Amino acid sequence: MTAERFPWIDPVRRRFSGYGMLGVLLLLSVLFSVLTLQDQHPSGDRAASELVDVLEDRADRQHAILLVARDSDQDRSFLEAMRTKLTDLGFTDVRLAAGGPPIIRAACEELASVDTGRRWLVTLNTSLPVVESITRTLPALADTEILSPRSYRWPTFLLPDNLRNVANQIAVIAIVAVGMTLVIITAGIDLSVGSLIALSAVVCAWLVKALGGAGAGPGAMLLAGLGAVLLCALAGLFSGTMVVRFRLPPFIATLAMMQVASGVAYIIAQGRPIYDAPDAFTTLGRGVDPALGLPYAVWLMIALYAIAHLLMSRTALGRHIYAVGGNLEAARLAGVRTGLVLVFVYALCGALAGLGGVVMASQLKSGAPTYGLMYELYVIAAVVVGGTSLAGGQGRVLGTLIGAFIIAVIQNGMNLTNVESYTQKVVLGLVILGAVLLDRMRKR
Amino acid sequence: MLRLRGVRKTFPGTVAVAGADLDVLPGEILALVGENGAGKSTLIKMIAGAHRPDVGQIELGDQDITGLSPAKVMDQGVAVIYQELNQVPGLTVRDNLFLGREPSLLRPLDRSTEDQRARQVLARLGCDVDPDTRIADLDLARRQLVEIARALLGEVRILILDEPTATLTPRETEQLFTVLDELRQGGLGLVFISHRLDEVARLADRVAVMRDGEMLGTWNAADLDRRQLIELMVGRSLEQEFPPREVTIGEPILTVENLQSNDLEAASFTAHAGEVLGLAGLVGAGRTELMRLVFGADRPQSGTVMVDGRLVPPGSPRSAIQHGLALLTEDRKGQGLVLDLTARENFALGNLDRWSRGGWIDGAREEAVFAGHVQRLGIKLSGSEQKAGELSGGNQQKLLIARWLERDARVVIVDEPTRGIDVGAKHDIYELINDLAAQGKAVVVISSELPEVLGICDRILVMHEGRITGEITDPANASQADVLALAVAEESA
């Protein structure tokens, strides 16, 4: 009867029925939002703009203004931003004090000795108690107004910085999980992705080093990245060929590749991380786009999911991947080139693991054979939590994205709520189990 | 002995069994017949304890066994032999017989006693199987006997068999019937589900008919002829079991020369435009194997296949399809359909190139083309997004026929086109086969049902042990005995 009254509800329901885990993701987000609801103290540019507005209204241009904050990168950027803005507005006497109580005290005493009329003290909430206790001991500053940004209540989890962080943390796993989803839909598995991440990171870093080290240009870095991805694609191609040509179980073929790739990574790196890379090497992993502030790695992830979704839902190849996983013999007898489909899927999975490795190398500005350890399990967990059946033939790429985010949100949420890292593992394991159980029961 | 009163079972959306009464007497064979979906399986599962009836009572002797667990029901003496045999293929016959009957999990097994009892019970069934053979090494008929033997190890009073002959050859069926006959004389109550009405007529004392969840009643087998029985099952009167058609046989389309493999001797034959060519023989005679070679599903050792004079590269279904061959396998669920994909997607598999450009599927065209076929063939769907696995056997078969119709194949090979399909839908399938032939295609029909082969084919090839042993050029005037003679008695010829 709901369907009669709301004719749109059925298509909507059908559209989202494959993404049951979306609800779990939203629930987790709500949970961690509630748990991390607390007073937020603005800092950086945001705080600077707010306080500059106040001063512009109320202070004369020649008043003495002392800006106080701790000696940290973030606080310094606040101080610098304020000074620049105030100077631009024509304020003549702007002083800075960054550091602990002794430095602040000295700066305050100096401020007390000035007599240009009113004096202003501007600080962040984090330094406010120190500033207040110091001014109480200095009678000359008794009438000095202390400005600090207004605090507000908001979940730390939902701060844009944190959400960006969540996305950035999961980017590598999510990228690799695209390929894994396709492999699992063909009723296969690829255990080698963790090792391929390491191999790719090492090869990429090694190539950058060979092509000029810290002086390597963008072309060289691009070449290094492509080389690493290509190598991993070949590794996947090899696994796929073993599966198709010699009927090896995917578990075995990729288990062997897992060992080989890891070993080769150690040999190339001689057991040590490779560091020699220019600063620009981190653009992919740490760089942020100017418009939305999203890391490039996250954009890459979004683009890959969009492409993979179209591939699986709109192309003949995608349909064939589902068919091969659902019933290999039926697909073959219907004229599908099943061997080609399988080899493609493993090669793609290898290439994406390689891409994940390049992103990781860029994030960490180095390549080491220890990267990607156990990642195959996180990646498989993301795929399975996303609703793809290990039996093959069923699953959705966007479900995997949701699965990856569920894992990321749980990890991030537990970090924010100060759950110990050992406990985190236990919780993560149970949540994966619970999420999949929930999905099973819903389907039944 | 077994008494059902007002037993009813509903599932969300459907009434599976609507208040059924049934009596099974000791020393009789009761045949339970009805179309697929009539509620037979649900009824059996309620007796076996796998489903709990919503209302109604099931009594065994003077005991109420309604809603007991399957294990308890079995202890009471009701054994069910399902179509999918419940065996561990890797274990021996003896281990399977005693699986779950071991007295204790840790106590060492008493091999000699088990061995003795196993031989006894197998001998009772006239089954010449060594208890040390692995189940996987047995043929289906023997595996079935082992399953029956397993039931007989306990105190069985009621034995229920769900389509026991579906996968047996005529000779094996005969053997099974002898066994069932003996069990009947031993005072067991037997319930026998079958789609093969000639078997029902042969074996059953009484017939219970179900239709759409209703138990229509029980008749003495002798009082019903085949036609009346079909009409009861279908709920309407049938004009004719095999629809008539105009036959215009044209040029040869399919030419097979000296095709052979490990198990098949060199086979040569042709099929003509407009012709329905039958391929008869016992199960295991190599009919399916031969047609898989023709289609390229398996690679032949030597020999050639030509369609319209063009050589088809061997061992590639894809090339075969491109040359105009189509194969509808006997194993629809295992080899024909991808059950998790929707009906539409299954239809489209193998046809995608017809409505995609550069690999991109034109979804709207696909929907439209599919809708056309659904309407023309009368495929019953709850929606185009319904999964293929949820369709009935007849609709699954039509779906696969639609796939090859869209492909416009020149030669359509149909393996056991009506296996597991109920009487009403069979007629539709026969008409579709006639249509294919009328469009000038060559149709090759493999069938184990002799009346079917004789009824729909224009010419019949008979195979025996991997060899084409004979040809019947005028099926209309041939008898089942003529075909069987070629299929089994080659040695004497």
Image: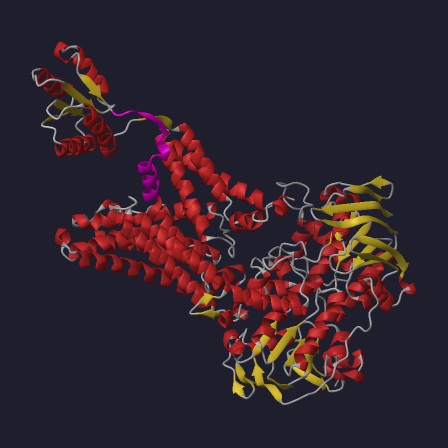
Horizontally, is A396 left or right of B188 in the view?
A: left
Residue B194 lies in what quarter of the image?
A: bottom right
Figure disc tally: 0
Residue B184 percent location from the top left of the image: 85, 57
Q: Nearer the viewer, residue A165 or A127?
A: A127
Q: Is residue A263 visible?
A: yes
Q: Quadrant of the N terminus of chain A?
A: top right
State yes or no: residue B35 in magenta.
no
Q: Is residue A195 above or below residue A231?
A: above
User: What is the basis of the colouring in this image?
Assistant: secondary structure
Relative to A432, residue B397 above or below: below
Residue at (55, 73) in percent of width and height: B297
Give B175 or B478, whichever is nearer the viewer.
B478
Pinpoint residue B157: horizontal percent, then vertical percent.
Answer: 82, 49
In the picture as drawn, the residue positioned furthest to the right comes out as B223
Residue range (magenta): A149-169
Closest to the observer: A244 or B42? B42
Please tell me which residue is depicted at 52% across the width and 64% down the height of the picture. Answer: B364
- Tell me the quarter of the picture where residue A28 sits: top left
The main secondary structure of the magenta stretch is: helix
Looking at the rendered image, the quarter that the C terminus of chain A falls into is top right
Check the image and name the residue furthest to the bottom. Answer: B251
Residue A245 shows up from this direction = no
How far from the left and from the top, in percent, is residue B392?
68, 60
- Indicate whether residue A154 is drawn in magenta: yes
Q: Is residue B377 left or right of residue B408?
A: right
Position of residue A152 relative to residue A130, above or below, is below
Camera-side residue of A439 and A123: A123
> Residue A244 appears at what percent x and percent y?
44, 65
